[in-house]
Structure formats: C-alpha cells, structure tokens
Amino acid sequence: MSWFTKSSPAAPPEPLPDIWHVCSKCQSHIFKKEWEDDLKVCPKCGHHDRLGARERIALLVDPGSFREFGEEILPSDPLGFADAKGPYAAKAAAAVKKLGQSESVVTGSGDVNGRRIVLAVMDFRFLGGSLSTGCGEKIVLAIEHAIQFKRAFVMVSASGGARMHEGILSLMQMGKTCAALQRLAAAGLPYVSILTDPTTGGVSASYALLGDVNIAEPGTLIGFAGRRVIETTIKQKLPDDFQTAEYQRDHGFVDIIAQRKDLKSVLARVLAYRVK
Amino acid sequence: MTSSPAKRVAAWDVVQLARNPGRPTLRDYASRMCDEFVELHGDRVVADDPAIVGGFARIGDVRFMLIGHQKGGSTEERIACRFGMANPDGYRKADRLMKLAEKWGLPVVALVDTAGAYPGLEAEARGQGEAIGRSLLVMAGLKTPILAIVTGEGGSGGALGIAVGDRVLMLRNAIYSVISPEGCASILWRDGAKAPEAAEALKITAPDLMELGVVDGIVPEPDGGAHADPALAIALVREAVLENLRKLSDGPSGDRLVEARYRKLRAMGAFDPKKAVKA
C-alpha cells in the first residue's frame, strides 16, 4: 500500500524517531527514554513490546552472571532451500550478522537472585523466532546441560513456529526438544516456561506449554493456528481476547500472568519452591 | 505390480496421489489389514474425536494398539471426522491409548494421514498446542515400541502428534511436511499458486525423507498409487507392519528402548559445522 501513504496529504507528520516511541497498540507518543526505562512497556496502555533475547536475559538474571554456550551453532541449510526472494542460506547468514547471535535462540546459564539456572531465550527478530535445526539443537543442549548439572531449566519462547526453510527437519525439532524435556522430567528437574509475544504454531505445540509452571506476559499472543486461518475455516468472527495470555489462563493453560517488571521476582519466587 | 522406488516423480504429482480420496483410510486398514479390531473410544476428558481412531488390533497372532487419523470415506463421514484433522481430544485419546498399550505390553502402530491439526475455536480453547506437545512428551517416554507409518498426508504438527516412532515408514506416494505446499507458497512466494514449486523445495516425498534420515523405510504402493488397487496397498502395509513389529520385538525394551528413541531423535538435525551457513 505504499502508493497510498506516498500520495496521501492527510498522513500525520512523522514524529522525530530518536526521541519518540509510538506505541504499536494505543499509538500514544511516548518519550523513548521513558519507554525504555519502563522495559519497553507502554505507560499509557501497558502494552508489552517485544524484547530481543539479550535484553530479556538482562532482565531475568543477575548482572554479570550469564554464561552463554552453544553460540558455535549456526543455521544450516539441509534442503538447499530457495524461495522467490532467493536462497535461504543468504537470508540466515544475514540474520546472524544483523543480530550478532548464532540462531533464533540464545542459551546459557545464569543466576536468578543467586540461584543458578539454565535458560534458553528465543528472539523473534531472528527469522520470526523460528524453530530450526540449529535452534532445536541449542535448546536440547541447554536441557542436557541442565540435566548434567541438576539445574532448573527456564525456556523463554517468542516464535511464529517451525522454520519452513529447513522443512521436515524443523518439524522434527518439536519431537527432539520434547524428548529432551521428557528426560529433564525423568531426572526430577524443574521446567519453567515463560511465554512471550508471540508464541504460536509448532513452538506452542511442543515445549512452550509443557512447563511445570507456565508464566506469560500480559497480552501475549499464544495459540496454535493463526486467527485468520481459523476464521476462514469456521466462518465466524473470533472473540477479541482470543489467544491472549489472559484467554489461555482462563482456559487452563497458563498459570501466572506477570508484568515484565515483576517477571524476575515471580520466577525467583516460583523456583524457590523446588526443595528437592 | 508395485512401482519402482527409483523413479523420480514431481513432488506436486505425489501431493495429488497422497491426497487422493480413494486411498485406504484408517478404518479400511482396521477392517481389512487386521483380523480383529476392538475400537476404544474417548479421551476420558470431554469427547471422542472421530478424526483419530484407535483400539486393540490383531494380525494373525500379533497383537498391537492401532491408532490413526481417520479421513473418512463418504462425504458425510469425511465431514463428520473433519477430514482427519484432529482436535486436542484426538491427541489426548491417542495419549491414553499409548499409555494403555505400554501398561498391557502391546506395541503401538500409528497410521498417519492428516492435512494437519484442526484450526478451530474449540480446538484452541481446549489447548491444541498443549495437547500435541503433551503427545510428543508421552511418545518420547513410552516404554513400548512405536511403529509410525505415514500412509497419505503427513501434515505438520498434526501428523507428528502421533508419529514419534522407533521406526517411521512412509508409503511410496505419501508426503510428510512442516507446512502444506500451498501454505508455504502463500507465505514465502506470496502466491498460493506457486505450491508446486514450494512442494519441490520443501522435500516432502518418501525418497526425500529417506535421504534426510527422517524415515527408516518406504512401503511400496500399487502402480498408479494406493487408490488404484486398495486391496494390494493394504496387503503391502500389512506386510510392512508385521516385518517391522518383528524387528522392534527383537530390539531393546523398557528404558533402553526410550534411550534408543532419544538417540534417534537427537540425531535429527544435529549440528555439523561443515554444513553451517557462512555468516
């Protein structure tokens, strides 16, 4: 629709991008500094904007305690996939370069109020946070690390689902990650799943909703099938709150909804109940 | 006559064969492949999903738990079972039957044939994602052998939800994919009509999946596809079931079986620095 905005004289003047943040939900103009200080939560409507994996890690673990591992695992191109926009290998390499991280998930260990945990944090900016062979491998290595060192495992999801470009092998990562979680459970170790916007498709249908405790940020989109797909299938309009964190809590799939500023303390409080 | 596995067929043509409504359905396999089938109903929570059918089954003196997607034969039946697209109740029924198989010492045979899990309001309200994820967890830890056979369409999470197997087979003209070619084309090509190209790029045919190490064997089909001679197609699947159950019964059991299943899954998409993209 670029022809429309270009030719429209009624389009509002763009605010100075350096100073202002425009809330993607309520369209309020907020001082960017204020918005960033509020952890990218809109002070007007409470909308929780998406965070990158490293911002999320800084929010969850004690300063200086994070030790990354698995960063040698880069995307692979098992199918030699190319679409209308060109080869997937180039697209994946560009994502690695742009974000300075090896895959759609960052993994490592860190302390939550002094308690050592293993965590895997997805990043939606990396090809839509898609679950690929590299992403699945990193998550499995993190879970195996948690088992080896008898730590709780904390997964932070942010994903549109499996990565199409790696085909069936992406789908198999759903089975592979869940098999690792099965071993974690057999070892009696805690699994806390934190669902952030969005958690959909194959990620919602594998590890994201299997936490011993599932925690979500307010308003997070959580669901398996896309809203438009469902509306087309059932030929009816869906409720406004459909597939929100609140909807999932009311339907029995999310335990706790935590504001971003409280997320770490809620996580710490929950983990403290592991007495074994 | 069965078709030669060496012959290269366009992926889009295989998609049409895999979706042919004349292919045998789960109920055809239950009644004509098995000498006995005792259907078991319900997820013990809210419903009996007609899109996933299961029960005790027997071929000769080989007993097993048969579970599979039911696409339906007649138009009425196809609508009633949502063309084999299961609700969470279907996956929870499958879980329940798999645990029952484990308890009674029966192997599981899962026949996969679905376009995907059902995208509906009730499916979401009852936790489609959680139900599929839970199934993956249950299968990973199941202490009885699982043989999964993709008989037609292996559509994404809806297929995998009953298909984590110790041995996974595909019929010669079956497909197994992370997304439908149409869905992939509309997202990555922004044009659903490019589905034939997407089908090729996604590598979804049985020989493709053999090469990728995702399936362990290909079950031959009659010339022209399973719909051309359903009786022969069913006989060939019967042969494959018996042969593979025999192999599985000679293999590890209990914790060693679970360990072997983990190693098998663990190897799928394992990282190889030589194959990584150059950043």
Image: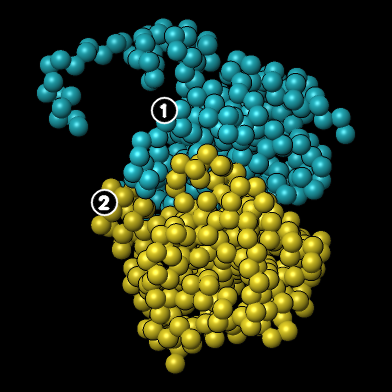
Chain colours: A cyan, B yellow
Q: Amino acid at mark 1?
A: Asp
Amino acid at circle 2: Asp
Closer to the camera in the image, B140 or B57:
B57
Badge 2: chain ID: B
In the rendered image, the vertical position of residue A215 relative to residue B63, given as above or below: above
Residue B82, quarter of picture? bottom left
Disc 2, SS: loop
Q: Is residue A173 left or right of residue B199?
A: right
Residue located beneath label 2 in the image: B191
What is the x, y in percent for residue B237? 56, 80
Q: Would you call the spot at circle 2 few (<14 residues within 10 Å), some (14-19), or many (20 or more)?
A: some
Picture layout, residue B217 above or below residue B115: below
Which residue lies under the disc numbered 1? Answer: A240
Q: Is residue B133 above or below residue A56?
A: below
How many marks can you see?
2
Give x and y (percent) for residue B273: 57, 53
Q: Nearer the viewer, residue A159 or B1?
A: B1
Res B136 visible:
no
**Residue ID at (54%, 86%):** B235
